[in-house]
Every structure is written in C-alpha cells, then in structure tokens.
C-alpha cells in the first residue's frame, strides 16, 4: 500500500475546494483535492456568477441597513487584476456591472432608497446610453441603477482555479474512498482503492470538508450530525434564443428578494441564454417545469414587455442552495461558514462571492491551530484519474 502524508486533504472540487486548494498551495502547504463527480460542483457551475455587494436586496434593505458584502467586489477585482488573494487574470468577466431596475410604480420609493447610497458610491443612477440596452427602450419608465457588482463566467473561473494546481486534483468515488476516524472525530487516514492500482493511504494533518451538499455524508463518516445544513431549492428558468440582448440586472419590488434576477450566458453553440432567478425561483420551488415556465413568461411580459422574446425556448432546473442551518443560515449570510471538528474543518462558502472570505478564515484557523507547512508535495502523480470539468446545466438541456 502506498502511503502519503499531506498537510491538507480537501474533499470537493466546487468553488470552495478549488479556492482553498489555490490559497493553501500558494501559502506553502502540501495539498490533495479529491472530487467525486466533476470539477465545478453542483452549485458553483450553475450559479449566476454575480459577485455582489450587499445591495441586491433593494428596497427591503431600507429596513435592515446592513451591507456586509460591500467589500467583496473590490477584492475580486483585485484578483482579476492579478494582485489580490489569488491571481485570477484571464478569467472571463461577463459584465463589469450588475444593474437594478425598479418597477415603474415603485420608482419613487426606489429613488429614496438609492439616494443615500449614491453618496458612498455603492450605487450610481444611470440614464440614457449609460443604461443597459434593454433599459434604454422608450417604453421603460422606471429607474435604473448601476451596482459595483460584477458578473463572472463561472466555467472560466473553475478552469483557472483547477489549472493552477492540476497535479493536486484527483477523482474518487464514494465506493473507492474510505475515511478512517478516531473516537475524537479526527480523520486519521483516507484509503483509496481503485481497480488495477496499488491501494493508497493518505495521512492528512488537516482535512477540509468542501463538498457542498456532500458535507452531510462526510460529517456522517466522522460520526457527526452537526453542523446541520439547510437545502433551499431554487427553480431557475433558462430561456434560449440566438438573438438575446446582454442583460445583467435585478428587478426590485417591495419584497425582500429581487422580483427577478437575470444574467446572460453564452452557450457553446454560439447562442445565449438568460438565466432567471430571484423571487420567481424561490417561490417556484414546488412548481413543475410547465407551470414555472408560465410564471416566468408572465413576469417577463409584465416587467420587460418591450423585449422581443418570440421564439425563445424555455427550460427550468431545480438546484439546492446549501447553507448552514440555524442562525448562520439566515437569509443573508455575510461570511463564509467555517467550523473545526477534530482535525477537520467544515466549510460552506454560502456564496461564490464569499470565497475570498472563506480562504482567509481557513488560513487564519490553521494559523491559530499552529499548523504550518510540513510535508512536501508528492513529486510523482498518484495513480488516480483527473476529474472531468463540469458544464452548466444550460449546455445539456436544450437539444
Ligand atoms: C441557482 C444558483 C445561483 C447562484 N448564484 C450565485 C451568484 O450569482 N453569486 C454567488 O456569490 N453565489 C451564487 N450561488 C451560491 C453559490 O453557487 C454557492 O454558494 C457555491 O457555489 C457553493 O460552492 P461549493 O464548492 O461549496 O459547492 P459545490 O459547487 O456544490 O461543490 C461541491 C463539490 O464537492 C463534491 N463532493 C461532495 N462530496 C464529496 C466527497 N465525499 N468527496 C469528493 N468530492 C465531494 C461535489 O461532487 C461537488 O463537486 C448560487 C447558487 C445557486 C443554486
């Protein structure tokens, strides 16, 4: 049996695991990442890609006045410029800004809300040609605002994060990977048995659980049911058409969520999709696809009646958003979740936006625990496969 010692073993190749792999390898730790399906994960690859500050909650934020996420877009912009926590130069930016538009009958209230933010530069009212093309139509009578938020192409982000440390990433399956723990919830070893190769035993100093919804099963391996996680199903609508204007915007109403959130994504066959979430997606969690599409069409017709969507094809997808349950899982997490159990660290980023915060918290935890880089990175590749890259759901559902 081949035995390997590593400073860090990471379960999960979504944004959380890949971000942590990069941060820790850059900090000098040896690390191995195990992914049981595809790189990009379940949630990450299917996210809108909005790197948002705290403002997407629009009018409802008038009651709460908390903007904890405000630093994140600037942190990401530094990374994209190659000078932040990670070098993300080359990652595709779909939009430099996400916008907000208000329903015409709420325009007055929206103005009051945004006026106070204009001074701090968080939001900028935009007129005429400065508006996204969809909101330049004469039929639009509401207000439009530009946020500091940017929108990333998640497949290119996953690709970049995975390519930096490709030789540290391996594919496992639940059947071939066995976690050995002691009675104090420490992971003492991870055994990997793959057909035709010598079994492998990995002794990690620290284990990072970055498996998204898979953390539940990983915690069971440790004999733990806590921390508990919560699944919030969102029912996203995708509409595909060769001619679709680029549009990245939230429509705010009176409720705590944006009524609609729309982002535009290029597809590999040269067309585009609008990926539509917001309240429509949350309230539609229990609807079937046909009914959800009818709701989406009604909303689009009511809120953007001047946009020509004739001939568009519609599909929907239900995806679970994973959040820590209880107080930490409140509607607006403003920090990534990090909790130590023995030599394991359980992580949920809660949002892609919070990946830099996740990296900082985990590094701080290692430092607080006195864990320094100790073991060398294996010089030879392990006898395991490299996982495939995942694709966003819209690449597969339109035939
Ligand atoms: C529809 C939707 C839109 C969203 N839009 C945004 C947005 O615009 N902006 C934003 O900031 N956030 C957004 N989010 C939230 C964001 O996508 C998630 O918070 C984030 O992607 C979670 O990343 P993750 O790495 O924890 O999970 P995942 O991306 O799900 O990755 C977990 C990975 O771990 C693997 N795994 C699980 N168990 C094991 C195991 N035992 N061994 C090996 N591998 C394992 C899985 O196969 C998977 O690949 C959105 C979420 C949804 C659902």
Image (tube, helix red, strand yellow):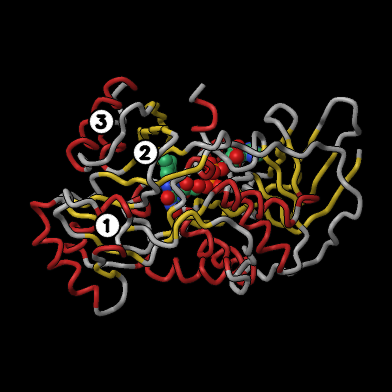
Compare residues 19 and 254 and report the one nearer the observer: 254
Circle 3 residues within 10 Å: few <14, some 14–19, many ≥20: some
Q: In which quarter of the image is residue 233?
A: top left
Marker count (numbered): 3
Q: Can residue 394 be seen in this view?
A: yes
Q: Are marks 2 and 1 in contact (CB under 8 Å)?
A: no
Circle 2 residues within 10 Å: few <14, some 14–19, many ≥20: some
Q: Position of residue 171 (x, y in %)?
A: 73, 37
Find out if the beta carbon at label 2 lies less than 8 Å from the nearest ligand 1 atom.
no
At x 71% / y 69%, what residue is drawn? Answer: 27
Looking at the image, residue 337 sits to the left or right of residue 10; the answer is: left
Q: Do the residues labelled 2 and 3 touch (CB within 8 Å)?
A: no
Q: Where is residue 106 in the image (x, y as percent from the top left)?
A: 10, 54
Sequence order check: which comes first, mark 2 or mark 3?
2
Badge 3 is on which residue?
297
Q: Is residue 25 above or below residue 170?
A: below
Q: Distance between the residues labelled 2 and 3?
A: 23 Å
Badge 2 is on which residue?
232
Badge 1 is on which residue?
100
Sequence order check: which comes first, mark 2 or mark 1?
1
Compare residues 103 and 20 and report the one nearer the observer: 103
User: Which dot marks residue 41?
Assistant: none
Question: Given this view, does label 2 or label 3 mark the residue nearer the observer?
Answer: 3
At x 17% / y 38%, what residue is drawn? Answer: 302
Q: Quadrant of residue 122?
A: bottom left
Sequence order check: which comes first, mark 1 or mark 3?
1
Compare residues 390 and 43 and report the one nearer the observer: 390
Looking at the image, residue 380 sits to the left or right of residue 54; the answer is: right
Looking at the rendered structure, the secondary structure element under dot 3 is helix
Q: Where is residue 214 in the image (x, y as percent from the top left)?
A: 56, 37
Q: Position of residue 360 (x, y in %)?
A: 56, 67
């Amino acid at each position: 049996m081949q035995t390997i010692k590593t400073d860090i073993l990471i379960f999960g190749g979504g944004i959380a695991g890949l971000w942590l792999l990069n941060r820790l390898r850059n900090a000098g730790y040896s690390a191995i990442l195990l992914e049981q399906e595809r790189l990009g994960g379940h949630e990450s690859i299917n996210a809108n890609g909005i790197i948002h500050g705290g403002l997407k909650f629009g009018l409802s934020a008038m009651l709460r006045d908390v903007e904890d996420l405000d630093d994140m877009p600037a942190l990401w912009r530094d990374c994209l410029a190659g000078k932040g926590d990670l070098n993300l130069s080359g990652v595709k930016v779909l939009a430099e800004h996400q916008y907000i538009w208000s329903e015409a009958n709420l325009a007055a209230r929206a103005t009051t809300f945004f006026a106070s933010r204009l001074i701090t530069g968080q939001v900028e009212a935009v007129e005429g040609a400065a508006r996204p093309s969809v909101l330049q139509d004469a039929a639009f009578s509401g207000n439009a605002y530009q946020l500091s938020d940017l929108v990333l192409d998640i497949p290119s982000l996953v690709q970049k994060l995975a390519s930096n440390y490709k030789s540290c990433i391996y594919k496992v399956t639940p059947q071939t990977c066995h976690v050995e723990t002691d009675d104090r919830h420490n992971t003492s070893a991870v055994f990997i048995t793959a057909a035709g190769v010598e079994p492998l035993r990995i002794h990690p100093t620290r284990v990072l659980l970055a498996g998204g919804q898979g953390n539940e099963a990983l915690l069971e391996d440790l004999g733990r049911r806590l921390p508990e996680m919560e699944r919030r199903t969102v029912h996203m609508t995708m509409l595909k058409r060769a001619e679709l204007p680029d549009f990245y915007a939230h429509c705010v109403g009176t409720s705590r969520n944006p009524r609609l959130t729309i982002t535009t994504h290029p597809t590999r066959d040269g067309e585009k999709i609008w990926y539509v979430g917001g309240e429509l997606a949350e309230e539609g969690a229990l609807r079937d696809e046909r009914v959800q599409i009818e709701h989406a069409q009604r909303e689009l017709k009511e809120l953007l009646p001047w946009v020509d969507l004739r001939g568009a094809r519609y599909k929907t997808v239900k995806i679970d958003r994973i959040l820590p349950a209880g107080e930490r899982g409140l509607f607006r997490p403003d920090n990534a979740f990090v909790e130590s159990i023995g030599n394991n660290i359980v992580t949920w980023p809660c949002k892609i936006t919070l990946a830099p915060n996740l990296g900082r918290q985990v590094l701080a935890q290692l430092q607080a625990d006195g864990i320094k880089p100790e073991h060398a990175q294996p010089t030879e590749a392990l006898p395991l496969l490299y996982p495939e890259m995942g694709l966003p759901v819209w690449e597969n559902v339109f035939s």
